[in-house]
Amino acid sequence: MRLLDRYQLRELTVIFCYCMAGILVFWLSFELLGEMDELRRKNLEFAGMLLYLWHRLPLYLLLQIPIALLLSILYVLTQHVRHNEIVAMRSAGLSLWRISMPYMGMGVALSLVMLALNEYAVPDAAARADAILNAGTPSDGDWTPNLNFRDPETGRIWTVAGFRGSTAELRGAHIEWRSPAGAREELIAERGRWEDKGWVFERVTRFTFLPGKDAEVIQLQTNRLVVTDFPETPAHLRSEVKISRLLGSAKKSRQVQLSLKEILTYRELHPQLSPRFDALLRTWFHDRLASPWTCLVVVLIAIPAGVGSGRRNVFGGVAATVFLAFAFFVLKEFSLALGSGGYVMPWLAAWAPNVVFAAAGLTALSRVR
């Protein structure tokens, strides 16, 4: 790495850290003001509040990192132009593309960081924060109430009063299905757990409704029943918990993020999906791949704006940043809505905003003299 590259990266990194720190201070302030009543009602101590905010932080970093990168590149390039450093670099025989390499490298690095956050930190961030808010510790708040789902392959209906994903435990399980002979089966259990590749139910009542109008009903009661022929596993229930949150209220759905692995797992466990729901999942999958590369798109937009700023006021670059960020996210939300509704192909809906703004940035960069 050349001395000039290290200088550019050092200047950008310092300003980027300042921007991130400023954005985080504003975020913490507004978050605390908005949630203070709820935090007080839950009697959270100061350490609990910090832990709650820490778990929620990954949900906001996906938006904060691109904005901080855009602001920092605009500021750094504007300062280089003001001090004639860009002119000196060009006079030394460096092309604008070569001057841009450190900034593009920074964009790629942050895109990979966001990809890792999207896959490993963001999906369970809201659940961990809610566990802190509702129960004080994540382990005590792991129960999901009122879980209902139907397996489209077997037709088996699960109605569960409580499900604990970390230990695969059930409370108040009510399961209905049809046997191969046509009888209707019902299993009611007070508790259940996944053990040795099968479900172990406790305090069980099982009903078998034989075919026919006047057929008898067979009832079986036992303290313990082991069932190994149910294809539904804890993975089914965990995926249903995530999907039910995603399709719930608007407030909760905005906090829920699915990882690429979770989407692939759900599709593998549910091969027969409605066209609309299939389009929604495919759009979310491609969005998980496309969203992290917003950082690289930001770099391509910021470089021509910063280099071409000349001796304009820095606030002009900030205003341009706000406008570009607003336009990008409006286009992204509109495109994802079209993809989720099945009006356009999911991959096109997810990648179109990146491609449009990246092409605009490359075009503007090629015209800078």
Image: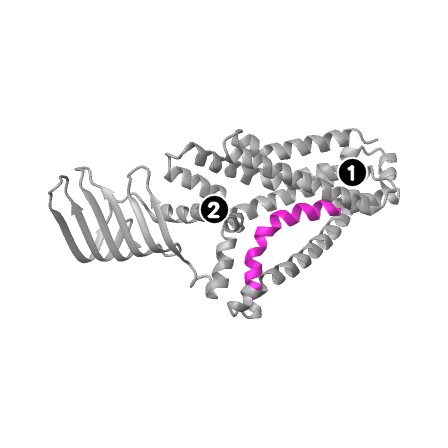
Q: Are marks 2 and 1 in contact (CB under 8 Å)?
A: no
Determine which of the numbered discs, if any, sits on residue 221 in the image.
Answer: none
Amino acid at pointer 1: Ala
Amino acid at pointer 2: Leu
One can see residue 3 in this view: no
Task: Check the image and report above or below for 321 versus 368.
Answer: below
Q: What is the magenta segment's predominant secondary structure?
A: helix
Q: Which span is picked out in magenta?
A: 49-72
**Residue 67 x, y percent position in the rendering:** 69, 46
Task: Check the image and report above or below for 359 versus 37.
Answer: above
Determine which of the numbered discs, if any, sits on residue 305 in the image.
Answer: 1
Quadrant in which the N terminus is drawn: top right
Report the front residue among 33 and 270: 33
Q: Is residue 296 magenta?
A: no
Q: Is residue 52 magenta?
A: yes
Task: Check disc 1 and report its element: helix, strand or loop.
Answer: helix
| Mark positioned earlier in the residue sequence (2 or 1) | 2
Determine which of the numbered discs, if any, sits on residue 246 in the image.
Answer: 2
Q: Nearer the viewer, mark 2 or mark 1?
A: 2
27 displayed left or right of 195: right
